[in-house]
Amino acid sequence: MIKVNGELKNLDSISLLDYLNNNGYNVKVVAVELNGEIIKKSEYVNTCLHDGDSVEIVSFVGGG
């Protein structure tokens, strides 16, 4: 199980980029923390999610 934004997900190993794309996230406007560490956007494709990982995904919203 992988915890994503506090919700447990039953996922096989998947790249962070694939997870974001498959779940409708716009990678240009999100920040991702994996197990307490901020992941650079350039590393999304090389970062795999595994059982026991904890992921926090934050979307930036403009306003005014």
Image (cartoon, rainbow, N blue to C red):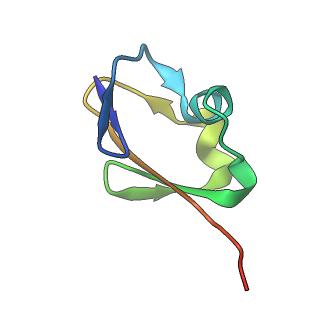
Q: In the shown orientation, is residue 15 left or right of residue 61?
A: left
Q: Position of residue 12 (x, y in %)?
A: 42, 13
Task: Name the quarter where the N terminus is drawn.
Answer: top left
Measuring from the top left, give residue 50's x and y in whole percent.
36, 25
| Residue projecting furthest to the front | 64
Which residue extends farthest top?
A: 12
Above or below, 53 against 61 in this view is above
Q: Nearer the viewer, residue 38 or 2?
A: 2
Viewed as shown, does residue 30 lie left or right of 5? right
- Residue 2 occupies quadrant: top left
* Viewer-nearest residue: 52 or 21: 21
- x and y percentages locating residue 15 in the rendered image: 56, 28
Residue at (32% x, 48% y) in the render: 35
Residue at the image point whose x is 66% and y is 68% from the top: 61
Across the whole image, how many numbered discs are drawn on residues?
0
Q: Position of residue 24 (x, y in %)?
A: 67, 35
Which residue shows up at 41% across the image and 17% down it? 11
Tell me if residue 23 comes above or below residue 6 in the rendering: above
Left or right? Give the position of 41 relative to 10: right
Residue toward you, 19 or 36: 19
Q: Residue at x 43, y 29 (%)?
A: 49
> Quick one: which residue is furthest to the bottom in this view?
64
Q: Quadrant of the C terminus?
A: bottom right
